[in-house]
Image: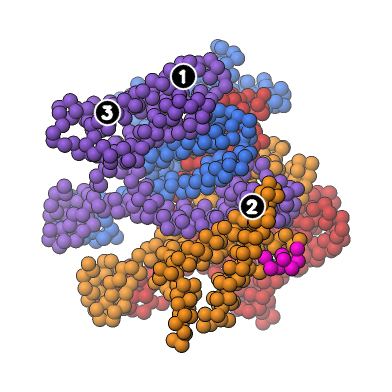
Chain colours: A orange, B purple, C blue, D red
Amino acid sequence: MEKPVFNRKLTPALKPYQRRLFEIVFEAETPAGRRFDEVLLLLIVTSLLVIMLETVQGFAALVYQIFYGIEIMMTLIFTAEYIVRILIVREKRKYIFSVLGIIDLISILPTYLELLFPGMHYLMVFRTLRMLRIFRVLKLTKFTSEAEVLLRGLKSSRYKITVFIASIFVYVVIFGTVLYVVEGPEHGFTSIPLSIYWAIVTMTTVGYGDIVPVTAAGKFISAIVMILGYSIIAVPTGIISVEIARAVREGASELNTRSCPSCTKEGHDPDASYCKFCGNQLTVSE
Amino acid sequence: MEKPVFNRKLTPALKPYQRRLFEIVFEAETPAGRRFDEVLLLLIVTSLLVIMLETVQGFAALVYQIFYGIEIMMTLIFTAEYIVRILIVREKRKYIFSVLGIIDLISILPTYLELLFPGMHYLMVFRTLRMLRIFRVLKLTKFTSEAEVLLRGLKSSRYKITVFIASIFVYVVIFGTVLYVVEGPEHGFTSIPLSIYWAIVTMTTVGYGDIVPVTAAGKFISAIVMILGYSIIAVPTGIISVEIARAVREGASELNTRSCPSCTKEGHDPDASYCKFCGNQLTVSE
Amino acid sequence: MEKPVFNRKLTPALKPYQRRLFEIVFEAETPAGRRFDEVLLLLIVTSLLVIMLETVQGFAALVYQIFYGIEIMMTLIFTAEYIVRILIVREKRKYIFSVLGIIDLISILPTYLELLFPGMHYLMVFRTLRMLRIFRVLKLTKFTSEAEVLLRGLKSSRYKITVFIASIFVYVVIFGTVLYVVEGPEHGFTSIPLSIYWAIVTMTTVGYGDIVPVTAAGKFISAIVMILGYSIIAVPTGIISVEIARAVREGASELNTRSCPSCTKEGHDPDASYCKFCGNQLTVSE
Amino acid sequence: MEKPVFNRKLTPALKPYQRRLFEIVFEAETPAGRRFDEVLLLLIVTSLLVIMLETVQGFAALVYQIFYGIEIMMTLIFTAEYIVRILIVREKRKYIFSVLGIIDLISILPTYLELLFPGMHYLMVFRTLRMLRIFRVLKLTKFTSEAEVLLRGLKSSRYKITVFIASIFVYVVIFGTVLYVVEGPEHGFTSIPLSIYWAIVTMTTVGYGDIVPVTAAGKFISAIVMILGYSIIAVPTGIISVEIARAVREGASELNTRSCPSCTKEGHDPDASYCKFCGNQLTVSE
């Protein structure tokens, strides 16, 4: 099992109350740590709901003041948490510039910026990034190893996925251009970029229907785009199935803890009788 | 093979007619039991058709009285069946609070409630839950073991699926918010929850076309949402393929624990008579 | 390799010209047989094109007479072919009632019926069934074994697929009814059957956009339907992947023609040293 | 590892500056060759952007002259590159008629043709084919082997895919015709080819919504088309998963033909030093 990236060690010189705080804020195994994570999850979800409902017309008018209050309170809580984390962590610089550290900062900064510069409503997007903190909470549970298998599957198929996306790109540019030429601006295909957008909408089988081919030739070519797009999805699925199967198998063989009695190395196949590293006989597994 | 969950044993003290009734109502292997299940399936489907057609304008006006009569009759039959089941089952409390027991109750209760409180047309939803009784009938056939393989596949991949759904959730909230900011209420993206709805419609490739991006930036970001959504489907497919493959394999190996009496090796095909490793005769399986 | 189903044997008493005809019409391996199949494929495609283009407004007006002539000619050719097949085949009854025999009849009958009873334009559907004859031609090539692998994969997963379709059915009925209650006739959900149609359109990610949820609650429930539908597709894909993998593996082991020198049985695993049927030593493969 | 197709050998008689040019233009492993490829990639992308933006209304008016200049310049650069490639390659004829050679020609020819015959705006499509040169650049990196695995997977499943596409074809023609008969021209299904287009739009789950069934019967049949289409996608996915799995496995085993010098058994892991079957030392691989 790989070590979690953010499992920072404490210096032995930490005072007891600091050690206690660390346990609560960073650990998930202790009861206090688990409770802290649960409260955090609740706060994040509440905060998200507030951000979302602020934009709903009816709601905003009614309870704007309440939402505003909750938002400020949330931000203060998250700020306090951020400061505590910085104070008690040993490698402060490492935490601040870590992915989780940046997410922690991003989840408080936009609210302050909006207070300073009102009207920058696009900061709202950054406020929703607060949601990424959900992964901080999930990270500390048994979900990590599952996520790791998924990520390992995606990672080991990254070259295949790049080739796939490059092909998709070439594919939509060519068919987008063809439809632009065939249908033309008078049927809604007003430019090549828009036609490429249409090709993506079609190939991914989203099919909004805001731009559709009108001529017989355009419909014929569209049909080809659709069938190809419909078939192409099989390719990444196949890739990822195979990679996940491999990741799962490798994950399993990690758990196959049969180790050589001579050299103590692990990773032997289930049917192996001799250590593949030192050649000595293996004990019978199970 | 696991024992079916609801295969309740009879007390030896049951009278012959009770034993007979039990056979008919709960068993599926006996001819009488199978016929009872077939009649039940027919009744369920008829009942469902009636509920559906009641809502069709033309139909309702014409044959409302007939439908009403059938509905009442069905409910009476199902009520009788429910009472019989309670009477003859030994662990009454266990049956009543079992999943199937609750479904049996739900399939009769709404009709009575509608008789008592006319106008509560949303009870109709509960009436369609009657359909879940189809699984009671299916349960007793060879479909169970197949459904079990499916469920085992889904169950053993539940953490991976949770991670996947959490990612999807984060994904649609972020992209929904981005589109809300980019397109804004003037292009139909009137609030963040609605924009998240749009993101879900797009990412799942449903693409109704009721809300579509209008600006170039919105279209560009949508294209990314589509391609990601189109690729992401590969992940659960891969997960479930692998899990089903494992469930099938394990299901097969459960049926195949034959080992060679001479060399004790396993992994023999079901049709093998001799050990493929040492050539000695295998014992007859089962 | 299994024997093709329709490879009927000739009686030894056939006259030479009959044997020659049989070779041309039923065999695909001989040059004459292959040429006959190619001509047949061309005729089928031409015939299909004529049927299709007949319905296109502009075309029909222009060249109706020509199309009519081609159609009659095609039907005569196919009729002649049908009669020849009946004449030269030994088990006439078996051919006439075989799947291919019925397709051969269906591909000529509708045209005659339309001549007798003009105006029955729905016979057109049956005329397109002529297209199924494409499979007669494909059947005789190396595609058969591939199609067999596909069919075997589908067949061996038929219980899983039934469970899956039953679940889909329950799923769309429940969600269709829920949306009918939530949205109601005023938002286009005019009856439960129509709402079920909407649920199918949504769950399969087709998403026409002719019926869409309008209320917030409806949109929220729709989002759930979409995400479930989007995830559910992973289940049949997983099932079929696994079954095809099994069919391919089994297909491969059929081609693994290693046979026991003692009992001549085949189907040994690549790593087997002894015959699993009679226990005698196998020769080393390859 | 197979040899890349276009890795042409130089004659020993090449002059040093020619050898140098060859290294830059055809090789990707040397620093100069890699830099050349990067510049080429940049030029291709710029050129594509120019072609696309030319068709955008606002842009074109503003900066048409600049775009025109860039386009001409690009074409001159690509022409120079094409000539250099012809000059330094030994088997000139082979290069000119190779796939990459033709792509190189196609990426320059349309611009010249447009200069000669202004107004042939459909040549634009051929200009976008310039984009295929991206694969020339990708080809020279580690992506090749991944693309090869994908292509091998697709290639070895070509018969299965042909059967699949033939089935899809039969499927959409039959259901298209059925819907034409059921819905008829008054509901937008004006001809069989258009109805087949509808069937493709529906089956691939694109679902534009430009043509939708209106009658109850049409909607019922559409629902079947959708569910079938939704399930059918599982078939190519399954096929390709299996084939990619095989291609990956074979790719791995190609790299791993190490056999034990003592017992000659194969199947050793890449990291094995001793035979897992008999315990003797393995020779060092490669």
- Mark 2: few/some/many CA within 10 Å (<14, 14-19, 20+): some
SS state under label 2: helix
SS state under label 1: helix
Is A117 within the magenta?
yes
Residue identified by numbered label 2? A53
**Percent of width and height locating residue C241:** 42, 49
Residue identified by numbered label 3? B84
The dominant secondary structure in magenta is helix
> Tags 2 and 3 in contact by the CB under 8 Å rule?
no
- Residue at 29% x, 36% y is B140
Residue positioned most to the top: C116
- For disc 2, the chain is A
The disc placed on residue B67 is: 1
- Callouts 2 and 3 in the same chain: no
- Mark 1: few/some/many CA within 10 Å (<14, 14-19, 20+): some
- Mark 3: few/some/many CA within 10 Å (<14, 14-19, 20+): some
Q: Which residues are magenta?
A: A111-118
Residue type, numbered disc 3: Val
Is C94 within the magenta?
no
